[in-house]
Structure formats: structure tokens, C-alpha cells
Amino acid sequence: MFGAALALLCLGTIAIASSSGQYAYDKHGNASYFLTRHMVWLCVGGFAMYCGARTDYRFFRKHSYKFLLTSLALLGAVLLIGSTINSAKRWIFIGPISFQPSEFAKLALTIYLADSLSRKNERIKTFTIGFVPHLVVAGLMMVLLLVQPDYGSAVIIGATTIVLLFVAGARISYILGVVLMTAPLAYHLIVGTPWRLRRFLAFFNPEAYADGVAYQLIQAKIALGVGGLTGVGLGQGKQQLGYMIEGHNDFIMACIGEELGFIGFAAVVLLFALIVIRGVWAARNASDTFGCYLALGISIAFAIQALVNLGVVLGLLPNKGLTLPLVSYGGSSLLLACYLIGLLLNISKSAPPKVRSTHKKKALANKRKQRAVVVCES
């Protein structure tokens, strides 16, 4: 897991250096502006990963409600004192440093769900105790995110909650009922908001919106098409020369696809798959139920955000404005992603030391048993 995360961080840094140079020079007069800032955040993120790996994850269980209330307060504060960038009020600036409360909210919700689900056990099957409270908390967060607006983060929080409830044993009828009830609301959010409607229509007919909301998508398709199997080479991409605006953010995979081709694109997908698989392994072998749900929630959030980002770049999903964890340029998003990797390493490290040897002993015992049966039959 650590090796896969380190590879993604290195690959993302190289892609940011390649994709942001022209844009940084045009906007700030310094071609290495974004790369320098990213390197600073990378160092802070490395320290955060170390802290996450060294701090006992059970600490969060004792303070789960404090983290939850703090995240809700920050989501409310950003609507009052936050800065508006690209028609969205998602950032709080403290001097030269900015952060997105939505990133902290993802961690706080996962901690709350892991704590609550581990305490309720069989009561998770009940509607009033095991289902409604978790849905209310997640719904409140989603409402605050939609007001910003941050539709992508709201989708991740909602999907993570539903998947964790399903894994914990909530009745499928409850989950299907919630999905059916939220469908009209999702339809209203899309049709009732002009810019969301344009994005949705551009998903089906991007050429009609080539000069507007579909501009980035078309440039991404051009980049991926030019990249082919092996790519044009590092630093040789043409879309970064003023065509792909802010390509170091949400559409950084277009840069990787152009310069490293399908091979580089597939390598990133495999690295994310490895992180998710090892995260699920850590959840399965966790020493307690809280660690199991926490590792599983983190892995689910990683998987959903990566899939949504890749789907947007490939034109399989409407644009959501989500970064690619560990790869895209960012401050608070990169910091949180590194810290979550540290938490997964922490949970994996806390697994009973004889888990792997126990599995081997069971497999060996089964083989011996099968041999004994064969001998007896012969």
C-alpha cells in the first residue's frame, strides 16, 4: 500500500510539473509556481502520513462526535466566511493557506459511521436506531455541501454512507427506498439549476458545448487520443500549451494519458486498485470492529473518488469537479489523502501478528485432511 501511494505521489508530481508550466507562467509569471507549492504540500502530506501511521486509530473512536460537530461547524462557516472561486464557496483562507472543509468532513463522517456501526451491531437492522440516524447525519452534510455548491463531495459522502450501511447489514429494502426517494431530488437539482443542466446536456452532446462547459472534456479526449498506447513522452504533451486550462487539477489524467499513453493510464488505475484491495484486506484483518469499518470506509471513499474522476476524464460521467487523490494538485485534498493512507497503514499494522500464519496453517491442515481422505479411499 505504501509503495503504491508513493508511486502515485511521484507520478502526480511529474504530471503537475508537465501540465502546469504554461498556465502558471501565463497567470503568475512563474512556470514553477504550482509545482513549488505542490512540493511544499507534498512534504506536509508526508508528515501527515507518518502521523497517521504512528497514531493509534482508536483515538478517533473516543472523539468521533467532536470530529463530527467540528466538521459540521466548518461546513457552515465556509458559507459565511469562505472565499468564492469559480462560482463556488468551498475554501477558507487563513493567510496564504487555504483548505476545504469538505475534505475534513469526509474523514469525520467515516469516523462517526465506524464508531456508530461498531456499537450497534445487530441493531443496525432496525429502521429507527440502525438506519435513520446515520442517514440524517450524512444528509445534513450533503445539504451543506450542495449549498456551496460541491456536488462531487456530496455524492462521495452519500455513496460511502450507503455502502457502509449495506456492509454492516442494513436491510436492502431501506437502502433501495432511500435511493428511490432521492432520485426526484437529484433530478430537481440537475434540471432546476441552469449550470448543472448545461453540464448534464454537455455529457450527451459535448460538441454542442465545445466553447463552454464541455471544453475541458473535448481537450481531454484529444489528449488521450494523441497519447495512444505509449504516449508522446514526458514533457512533450501539446494540450498543456494553453489548450487544457488548469489541467493539473481535475483533468490531470488527461496529461498522463497524453504523455504516457494507455500504459501510463492503466498503471495509475492498477495502483489505485492495489490501494483499495490492501485497504479491504486491512479491514478484514483489523483487530476490532471499529478498525474494520474505518478501513473499509476509507477504502470506499478512495475508490469512489478515483472512479468518478477517471469517469469524467474518459467522458463516462458528467463533470463533478473532483480531484484525483494523491495525483492531482491540491493542498487540503493532498494532505487528507496522505493522512488516510497513514491510517490504513496503522490499521493494517495493528492486525493480529499471527493472522497470516493462521491462514497458512488452516490451508495446510485442509491439504493434509484432503490427503488423508484420499489415502483412506484408496
Image (spheres, grey):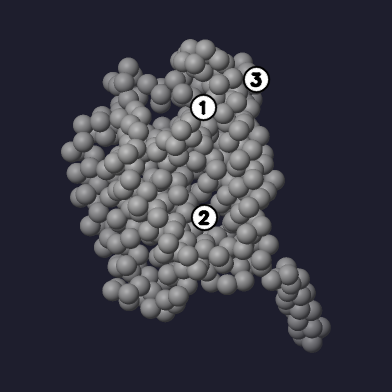
Q: Could you say which is closer to the camera, residue 332 or residue 97?
A: 97
Which marked residue is nearer to the observer: mark 2 or mark 3?
Answer: 2
Q: For mark 1, what is the residue?
A: 248
Location of residue 300 with respect to 211 vertically, above or below: below
Question: Which residue is found at the position 32% from the left and 17% from the top?
Answer: 211
Q: Secondary structure at mark 1?
A: loop
Q: Amino acid at mark 3?
A: Gly
Location of residue 168 with respect to 158 vertically, above or below: below
Q: For mark 3, what is the residue?
A: 233
Question: Which residue is found at the position 51% from the left and 49% from the top?
Answer: 302
Disc 2 residue crowd, few under 14, some 14–19, many 20+, Cα 10 Å: many
Q: Secondary structure at mark 3?
A: loop
| Residue 326 in picture, x, y percent from top left | 57, 40
Q: Could you say which is closer to the camera, residue 164 or residue 230?
A: 164
Disc 3 residue crowd, few under 14, some 14–19, many 20+, Cα 10 Å: few
In the rendered structure, the answer to whether residue 353 lies left or right of residue 309 reads right
Question: Which quarter of the picture shows residue 272?
Answer: top right
Q: Could you say which is closer to the camera, residue 317 or residue 164?
A: 164
Q: Amino acid at mark 2?
A: Ile
Alpha-carbon distance for marks 3 and 1?
17 Å
Question: Which residue is found at the position 76% from the left and 78% from the top?
Answer: 365
Location of residue 245 with respect to 173 vertically, above or below: above
Mark carried by residue 298: 2
